[in-house]
Structures are given as C-alpha cells and as structure tokens.
Image: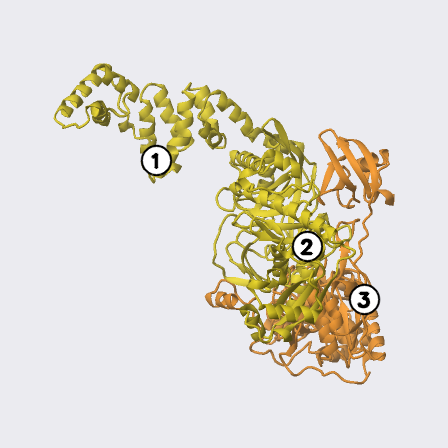
Amino acid sequence: MADDSYKGYRGEALGVLKNFNALVWSDVEIKTDTGNFKGIILPRSETSDNFHVVIKLRSGYNVGIAAKRIKDIQIEGRKEAHYKIPEKEFPFDPKKPNVKLLGTGGTIASRLDYRTGAVIPAFTPGELYGSVPELADICNLDTEKLYGVFSENMGPEQWRGTAEAIGREIEKGIQGIVVGHGTDTMHHTAAALSFMVQNSPVPIVMVGSQRSSDRPSSDAALNLMHSVKTAAESDIAEVMVCMFGPTSDEYGLLHQGTRVRKMHSSYRSTFRTIGDFPIATVSREKITPLRDDYRKRRNDKNVIINTEFEDKVSIVYYYPNMRPDIVDSLTDNGYRGIIIAGTGLGHVNKPLYPALKRASEKGIAIYMTVQTLWGYVQMYVYDTGRDIMELGVVPAANMLPEVAYIKLGWALGQTDDLNEVKRIMLTSIANEITEREPSNGYLILQGGLPEVEEFISKYRK
Amino acid sequence: MIDFVFKPFEEMTTEDYRKVGFKSGLEIHQQLHTEKKLFCRCPAGRYSKNYNAEILRHMRPTLSELGEYDGTALMEFKTKKEIIYQIHRDTVCTYEMDDTPPFEINDDALDKGIAIGMLMNCVIIDELHIARKQYLDGSIPTGFQRTAIFGVDGWIPYKDRKINIIQISIEEDSCREVSDIGHTRVYNTDRLGMPLIETVTAPEMLTPVEVMEVGEILSAVVRSTGLVRTGAGAAREDVNVSVTGGTRIEIKGVPSLGRIPKLTYHEAMRQWNLLRLREELKRRGITPETFKSKVDNVTKLLKKTKYQPIVNALSNGNLVNCVTLKGFKDLLRWQTQTDTYFSKEISDRVRVVACLNTLPNIIHSDSAGETLAASEWQTLKKHVGAKDKDTIVLVWGDERDAKTGAGEIEIRAKEATIGIPSETRQALKDGTTGFERILPGPDRMYPDTDLPPKKITLERIEELRKILPEPIWEREKWYRELQIPEDTIRPLAISKFANLFKKLVSELKINSVLAAVALIQYPKRLAKKKFDISNLTEEKILEIFELYAKGKTSREGILLLMEETAKSGMINKDKIQPMLKEKDLNKILEEAAYETEHIKINNPEKKNVIILGKAMNKIRGRIDGSKVSKQIIKN
C-alpha cells in the first residue's frame, strides 16, 4: 500500500521524492542536470511508470521529469487542489413540481481522479445547482446517491435497489423521477426497470452523458435539463431513456426503456430506438410527442414493484463455426436461461443442435432473438428454424437480445414453471415485443448517397 | 513618473519606452508541415470554404484541475452564444466534432516540434503530459485545445544579448471564425486539429521595434528547418505587453510582424493612460471602495426621441437602460489610444459580453451633442437623479442583453478605479487594440484524461539531432564574413538551398557572392517571368554549377541554364556552347561593330553599349560579360 503523502508514486520516483521529503502538492523548484522546473508536485496515476515525477508548471501545464535526472528539490510551500463544484442550496418553489434524481454513477457529474487519472462521478443537489442552475427554473430537485459505479458494474443488485428506491419515491408522491446512469449499460438498466417497476403513475427518465461534465462541450447539462423537464412536465408515465437526438445541442429523444440501445461507442446521439420510433422529442422549451400510445401520467400511487431476478441467465452471440461446448458449459454450470442472438431470422448451425437439445431437456429456458437487432425472429421460413424450434428453442419475436436477457432473468425470478416463464416472456409488458414494426421505423442512413448528403446538409444531425 | 505623456509613434525614443517600463514578449504559433492532423488521421492543410453539414453546440465553464473556475470561461458563459460549426467531410472526422476520443499523438508532428525546440536551445522534457486548455469561445468544438509542453528554458541570440524562450508546446489548431453576430458565432473547421507549435519568449523586448525584430528571428529559425508550413495563416503571433504598474495584456492573432510596432506602442499607451485615469479618479475620490453606479430603465422617457439607433431599438420592442456613473464627468472622453477614448473600452465590453454588436451600442452624456437632444439628456439626468459631475451611459437591446450590457458598463467603469483589467485584445487595422476577452489564467488547464503521458526517449532526441540544420545565427555570421549582400543574408539563411550554398562554396569553390545571388535572387527573377521555379531542384542547380566550375559555361550561362531548366524541367545541354576563345570574341565584336556602323546613333557615347548588346546576343553564356566589355574598350 503506497503512502498517501506520495500518492501514486512507486519505485525510483518514490525514492527520489522521499529523499528530498517532497510530498505530493508541494510547491517546489526541481533542479535537474538539464534545467530547473518550478511548480507543484502532482499525484501520479497508478497506471503510469515508476520513473517520472509530474509537476504542474506555473503556466498550468504538466510535465514529467525523469527521477534519475533530479539533483535537488527545494520546497517552497504547498498548494493542494480542492476540487469542488460551487455548492449552492437548490431553491424551493411550491408552485413547481417535485422531481427526484437518483444517482447510480456515470459522468453526468464528475471530477478528476488523481489515482487513475480518470474521471470519477460527483453528485449532490447543491453541486448540480452550482453547475446547471437552469434546473431550478423547471422543478424542485432532490437527489439521492444510490450507487457510485461505472455502468459496467451495474447488475441485479443495483437494478433491484434502484427499482425499490423508485417505489419509495412514488409512495411519497413524487411527480417525476430521473435516474443518472453511465451510458454503457443504460439500456440494460432501462429494461430491468421496465419490468421491475410496472404501472408507474409518473415518468421515470434515465439519463447520462457521452462527454463527461468536466468538459465545456459536455452534453451532461443539456441532458439533465431535458430529463428533468420530462420528469417534471411530461404526461408520459413510462420508463424512458433521455439522450441527445442529433449530435448538435438541439433536442433530446425519449426512448421506450425496452426498445432502446447504445449504437455508437462515443457519439452524443448514440441511443436509438430499435424496431420502432421514439416516444417524443424534448427540448428546453417543449416536449413533442411522436406518438400517442404511451401510458399517461396519473394521480394515484398504484405502482407495482417486483424485483425478483434470476441471475443464472446468459446471452450466446452466435457466430459461424460455433462449437457445442459453448452451450454445454452453460448447461454444466447450472444456468437456467439462455438467450441466443442468432443470425438472420434466428438461426444457428447444426453442430449446436445436440447441445441445445440437451440444455432444453435439462430444463433450461432457451429463447431466440436476432443479432440484426432490427426485425422479427421468424423460424418457419427455413427448415433450419423449424428444426431449432423442435429442440425447444422459443422465438422471442422482436425483443432485443439484451432486453430478452433481462426479461428472462426477471421471468425466471417469478416462477420455476417453464410454461409460465414462456407466457411471461411472450406477453409484452412495456413494448419489448410489438405487434407491428412501423414502415418508417427502420432508418439507418447510408452516408455518401446523394439523397442522404442532401439531408445532412439541410438538417443539423 | 505618471506625468509622462505618450508622444506620437514616430517621436517615441528608446528612453521614452524605458521611462514607462515597456516590456513585451511573444507567443508565436507556427503550423508544422505534416501530412495528417495531430490527434486524428484527417489530412492537414486542405482549406475550403465549402461545407456539407453544420452542427450546433454551446459551451459551459467547468472547473480547473485545482478546483477553480477560469475568468474567461465565466465571461464566455455570460455571452450565451450558439456556436455553429461548418463541416466538410473530406477534412473533418468524428474526432474534430468531439464525437470520438483522440487517437495517439502524431509522432511525425512531435518529432518536428522537438527538432525546432532543440534549435532554440530548449531543454526537451522527459515525459509529455497532454493538457486541455479551455477555450469557451467555441473555437474548438471540445471546448478545449489539446496541448503539451515538450521544451522549456531555451534561448535565441538577439543583438548582443539572449532572448529567453520560456517554453515551447505542441498543440492542435483551432477553427477559423466566419462570423459573430448577436448570439450566433459561426466557425469553419478546415484548419481545426492541424499540428502547430507555440513558442513563448520571456518579456525581454524593450521597444516595439525589438519585438518585431525578435519575431523575425523566431520566424526565420522555424522556416530554416523546412519543417513548417508557410503562407497566409501558417504563422500567427500573440504579443504580450506591459508597462510599469500595468498588467500583462495579450494582443491576439497579429497577422504580420510588420504590424507589431504600432500595436505594441498603442497597447503601452493605453495601459499608461488607464493608469493616469486611475490617478484622476483617485484625485476625485473614486476608489474601488467608493465607486458608485446604478441602472435605471429609461425606455419610457425616450419614446419620442429622434436619435435613430434608439428609434430603431424601440420599434423592435427593445428597452433602454441608463447607467449612472457617479463622479465620472468627462472621463468617458479620456484618451486611451490615438483617436480612441475610454468610452471605447466600455463599448467593446458591451459588444463582446452582451452581444450588442451593432454600433453605436452605447451613448453617453460626455459626448452629448452628437446623439440625443440636450433636453433629452436633461430629462434623463433628472429622472435618474444624476448630478452635474456624473456621467450617464445608455445601452439598449432586448431585456437580457440590455441587462448584461448595463452590468458590463458598471463592471468596466469600476475596473478603471482598480487599474488595467487582464484581458486579451484584438489587433485592429489602424494599429490600435480592441477588447477581445478576459485573459485566461492557469486555471483553464486540465489534464487530458483521454491520453496517457508519453515518454520522450534520449534515442529519439539523438536521432533528431542528426537532421537539425545549423542555427540561422551561425549561418548568418558566416555569410557576413563572406560579404554576402545584406539583403540576401536572411533569405539565404532560411532557404532550402542553405546546405547547397555551403557545398558550392566549400567544395566547388564557387565565388560566395555569385552562389548566394544565384540561389536567392535568380529564382526570384525567374518566378517574376512566370517560370516554374519548382523545376530548380537542388540536384539541377548543383549540376549547373558543376558545369560552371569545369569552365563549360560562363557566369551568364548560369542564369541562362537556370532559366532553361525552369522552362523545360531539364538542363538543356544544347544551350551550353563551349567557352569562346579570345580570337572568336574579337571576330564577333568586329561583326557587331560593322553592323553598328550603318545605324544612325544620336548619342555617340552609347555606341559601345549598342555593340555590346549586339555581340551579347550571339555569345551569351559562352564568356563572361565583363571580359566582353573590356575587349570593346580595348578595341
């Protein structure tokens, strides 16, 4: 365990700093065989090497100095960073709706972590008001930090905890809920909340940011405003994801929690509704529904919180030449449910058949989804599909693979009866299965085509 | 000491600048010549006004690494601009749009930067840390520039002293502004992300001319390497100026070195006069503690005015705010620069911060006659309770802008009691400077968490040392010893032919003045004749000089062969005629003399010139012209 006075330094660099008693945050002049440097010794990222000392020069720039060149360190003072967003009490206006922001992590509000050199989340109503004062024009905001994890570390325990927290807030009469979340698995959590929190009387809006809030161009502030506005004012009582529509700072989209997916590793407009179109657009001025078949806001508190979840479920993403041992290992390790993301209309190769048959016979619930993401499973068109169904694999219509994974875990949490599981799986709860795919749903524009270029030149995408 | 009053530019002496404590330093931005951009793989150096798409962004201030907000950031946030980026698909990828994290730094650019840093005697640092330098004006879509210091503590020689280089950094270039009207600012992104280096000198230049001359040396050093881009916009200077008791003020984006003397003179004058203004305010008992001002909405009182700008404003439903500055009478007419007054400081702020950029954007009672009727000023003063020794200032706009504008008037007036606000200033065409934005400090630096530190190895530095040219000051010293004409020294020192020159003089033993003139002046002459001088490669010129050295062509023949080569891209051996023997020369001269006999010559003294002309047509390139003249005179 490294001494915190020399935060992050190890080996040669640590030796030199200790030698001169130069703690992190010391204001120093470092003499080396090539030149002198004046500045503040910064902590070192633990993933960096052992051979350099980092200082912040007077100009604000950081440089690394090879420890072995250091001849002397004169300590002139100390200046420790106190990274703190100016905290101001969030104003209360009895005429405005009350909104609760539940934090789970992510970069919607964040600060620098010297240990890793990466950003870590920071989050209180006061801090949020200090950095996005516009929120006070929309509602009375209260926050509760449930977790402080990156979204890849979210799992059944956190889904349950979040659903229960939502239930408590609705019980207390809140008018809207916002859930701050890292974006990577936001759509998994959105699906989980769609099943665990049913019949909500108020909007439940998930939000995050693709550019962390320590950057001037961050999408965090606008996403927060959009989500808080939706929670406070919209009549859409659904679990939704609220993120940028275009990459421009123009409007956000409200996606159904079971139909949304992160589609780009870094774009602001990464979230897209798949197999359908979004519920609404939201700007700072207004919420514009794109459809009218959503559940409407109510005045009651009749929410159903059901958080039972079986976590021995897996997704098998099929690829050509997949060997049966992949399926066998799930069977042998006691898995109770498998979602296959099959090719085309829902297919896998023949060598997998015996393994799937064995799994099915052992009582594992197996469902087929499509890795094309868009479109329905249709296993009657080709013989392959019929054969696979014979093995006990159930087609899951147009449920997205990740959503089917969450739903199967939740369904197996409800019952051990596979027929009941099947009934639950194939009965749509929150539009995870839709009866029809709208003709204007599938739109993946192909860049380079003249008509698309014309579109791009006309609209800020 | 504050008694000193600035004289006209031409009359200022070195001693005058010493009296006011003039100090100036340079920050030179120079694009590197690389194929690709710095943090993505887009092509560098493709400029176009065309674009295929636009995106819209806003910028918000964030905290610095040490947990503080930067002043500029807050000012830019007050302006609430919508930033529009024009995007061309060939020059911009998702990185510049801030929709993809950075790729690793372009090593070619880093090598070139380090080489230049070494030439300026900088200590190359061991480990490169990429920082984010915030720019909330939107000139970079991320809201920050990725930048890293790779060298510190360098120097270049100037006169009989050294000018210290504080640091040299590598960074990505920003957007070019297309327009900035009201709350909308538009940027072209073609230049965005191109690698450039920024060289910062210590504030060691003591007169405006010194600043320019040091700028010229720095520019020559980088151009001598052949590693940088040249042409419009490839190099841009920021100039820091301060006077005793003043503030370090940065004049941004000076487009040419020749404009530096006037600009730095005016900036020093402005600071000096603002210090004198502070004295005057103090004399009147106005200090930061006693400063008083107030804002009134006077829209109703001006309903019937005939002053056109306010008539227009009111017809657009705008409102008029009146700021009373207690005890400020006549001070808005206090001179700051040539034909420029304190009111301009206020108007500039209102323009930039409140986005009121239709001028005039303020009027005031110190220049009452030119605007409202005297009776209107009276009514206003009475209404807001202004006394005789007060000044009132009007600003108009929509509710938000008029409010911001009035606030800025109060802020700027109060700052006059404190001194000279830290800010960056624009270089204006008339040689004066105008407010651009609050000067950003070290608080706007933030480590780039997207990229790890990068070690600069000793091996890398040693490899680069091998390709370094000798510093231009050494070249120039040698050229002076060789008595090269003064106007050819600097161009030769930075020329791509500097190494060739050395070879011609040291190995081929060519006369150094001839070689210098042939390498620098001949191509210029040929370019004027619209020949393609890119055909004149180092190899071709060397070949021509080898012919000369072997006695196969004359001095004149060098120009002739260079011209032929520029024309055709090849050395035309047919054009090389053997050198003339003296008896052949005589024969040609005799023929020329004979032909001349039949021409009526008004001025007999010109006869020899005419003979020479006729003869030279036949013998050009085959013998030195000087020998011909001698022979004519002999004949």
Q: Which mark is residue A125?
A: 3
Q: Chain for mark 3? A: A
Query: Which numbered mark, 3 or 2, is in the foreground of this view?
Result: 2
Q: Residue at x 64, y 67 (%)?
A: B401
Same subunit: marks 2 and 1: yes
Q: Secondary structure at mark 2?
A: helix
Q: Colour of chain A?
A: orange
Cα separation, mark 2 vs mark 1, equals: 53 Å
Q: Which mark is residue B566?
A: 1
Q: Which residue is mark 2?
A: B72
Above or below, B316 relative to A314: below
Q: Residue at x 85, y 76 (%)?
A: A168
Q: Colour of chain B?
A: yellow
Same subunit: marks 1 and 3: no
Q: Residue at x 57, y 70 (%)?
A: B310
Which residue sits furthest left?
B598
Q: Secondary structure at mark 1?
A: helix
Q: Chain for mark 2? A: B
List x then y, in percent, for residue B23. 65, 38
